[in-house]
Image: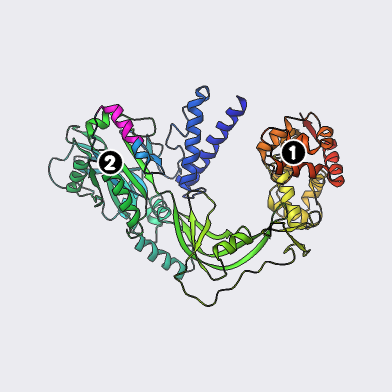
Amino acid sequence: MKYINNIIKNLRKKIKLYEYFYHVLNISLVSDYKYDKLLESLLILEKNFSNYSDNYSPTKIIGENFSNMFKLKNHILPMLSLESFYKIDYFNNFCSFVKKKTNIDNVKFCCELKIDGVALNLLYKDGILLHSLTRGNGYEGEDITNNINLISNLPKKLLGHNIPKILEVRGEVFILKTDFNNLNKMLLKKFLKSFSNTRNIVSGALRRKHSESKLNIKLLFVAYGIGFIYPNNLFTSHYKMLKKLKNFGFYINKYNLICNKKITVFNFFKKVLLIKDKINFDIDGIVIKVDSIKLQKKIGYTNKFPKWAIAIKFDTENLETRILNVRFKIGRTGILTPVAKLHPINFSGVVIKNVSLHNVDNIIKLGIKIGSYVLVKRSGNVIPKIVKVISKHKKKKYKKIFFPKYCPCCKKDLVLSKNNKIYICINKRHCISQIKKNILHFFSKNGLNVRGIGPTIISKLVDKKIISNPLDVFKLNENVLYNIKNISKKCIKKITYELNISKNVNFYNFIYALGIPEIGISASKNIANNFNSVEEIISANYDDFRNIKNIGKKISKNIFCFFNSSNNVKYVKKLSKILRIVF
């Protein structure tokens, strides 16, 4: 159970870090898909292990980090987020849930575009704008009223008749793609850093002191709902409420649609998917809401989401680009990987300049050449891949990709694998690239977990010939580290302290740290559970490994071959004398 508790704690910590970077620093460390999947995993764990519940978990609160630049004010009613899914088929589940809650077969839905911007809550009293708040943690937000002049279409005084005494209007602040592109062109002409996506521009502009803003940024606001309203009996339909907001002077998206049947919702999603690239602002999906205000109240809310609405996000992004060049790198196990240098493409704020081509077989299969125009797919995950060559571009100056005969790092001969797909550098003990990556792997989180020893420091130590394997790292002291440039005293003390406590290591972490090919943390745990000492695993034969549950032929062969090497056995025995391995 302690293991589960640690997983839950680590998930919460990771999600909160991503939220801080996204909401406060305007930096997307991961894709929306990866973030949503982490949140979904945490939610499942918390449901199955309710004794580890936490009221401050990211599954129960919308956010908690603020920039400290603005005063905080409370929303009258909570400004909740939306539960997101990546397949339109989930709408069937949503319909079943709504029917169960309402006991009504044919519920009307209002479908809208999910605009990718910054959520804003506007408070009007007697039709006059009092203040504007960011979503914040859902209960209180940053007061950015002084910056609303940047939003050109925001009514400071409501128009028309029957204006509520008190009204919270919720919506999204965004920028047109054309304005975004023009602004970036202007910045590049002035040799200034351009913006990576439209949301970053919006968030940065709203959170900057207006007097400091020298850029002509044209922000827009689209209303998508209300919070508190008094008197509260003005609306019975969400769709009609949007029409009324339009009469009050708000911009309402023209693509909003009332759907009486399931098929209409599915068709709406398909239509949006086809036209999304032609729309002059960024959208990342659609929103489906129960139209009846009465039914919305009956269905209710969680602490984080309204139960009567969901977002269906676009699962896959495909962008076209061109391969400018191909370089080769040597991995930890000596495998040569071709990496394509691309004309930069932007996936929701993440700029992709390089993508792995994997191996010879993949290059031949896709027909990839230097100069090829290709379609790059990013199916929600962080690592994109080339899915096909686009043949419509006719260009004669394509260059065939030739694999090197020698290792690009140590210049030794490369060996072609039996299946003729992979080139390998077998100069493991003297190839600098492999040395650096093996040391990094040894002290990584699933290995000995030494914080402070990262790729930069390892690279410096290897280049200066101070270390060449993990054994050498344990010989480091403060005097040696002081001679390395750009390492602070604080960092040096941290490294020496972490190295000392890392000597107490679980057997499975030790096995993982050895870097045996194909052996991840799960396989390491399975192997460790079957041996009681280092001597036992050294003397084991192939059948001993093969008999371990969930350990296949390939992994059994890899681990047997590793311990069948006299050099490896000497290395492991030396390590076992330095470390205090816990079995």
In the rendered view, tell whether residue 179 sits above or below residue 289. below
- Position of the C terminus, as image quadrant, is top right
Q: Which of the two marks, 1 or 2, is nearer to us in this view?
A: 2
Q: What's the image's color scheme?
A: rainbow
- Position of the N terminus, as image quadrant, is top right
In-front residue for pair 568/216: 568
Q: Which residue lies furthest to the left in this view?
A: 161
Badge 2, how many Cα within 10 Å: few under 14, some, many 20+?
A: some
In-front residue for pair 480/258: 258
Relative placement, left or right, of 401 versus 21 is: right
Q: What residue type is labelled 1?
A: Ile
In-front residue for pair 156/393: 393
Question: How far across and how far down the image is residue 228, in percent?
Answer: 26, 34
- Residue under label 2: 262
Determine whether label 1 and label 2 are within 8 Å by CB: no
Question: In the figure, residue 91 lies in which quadrant?
Answer: top left
Residue stretch rendered in magenta on the structure = 93-103
Relative placement, left or right, of 210 versus 519 is: left
In-front residue for pair 372/142: 372
How much space separates mark 1 and mark 2, taking CA atoms?
53 Å
Residue drawn at point x = 77 percent, y = 65 percent? 411
Question: How far across and how far down the image is residue 294, in percent?
Answer: 22, 30
Q: Which amino acid does label 2 sit on?
A: Lys
Marking on residue 511: 1
- Circle nearer the N terminus (1, 2): 2
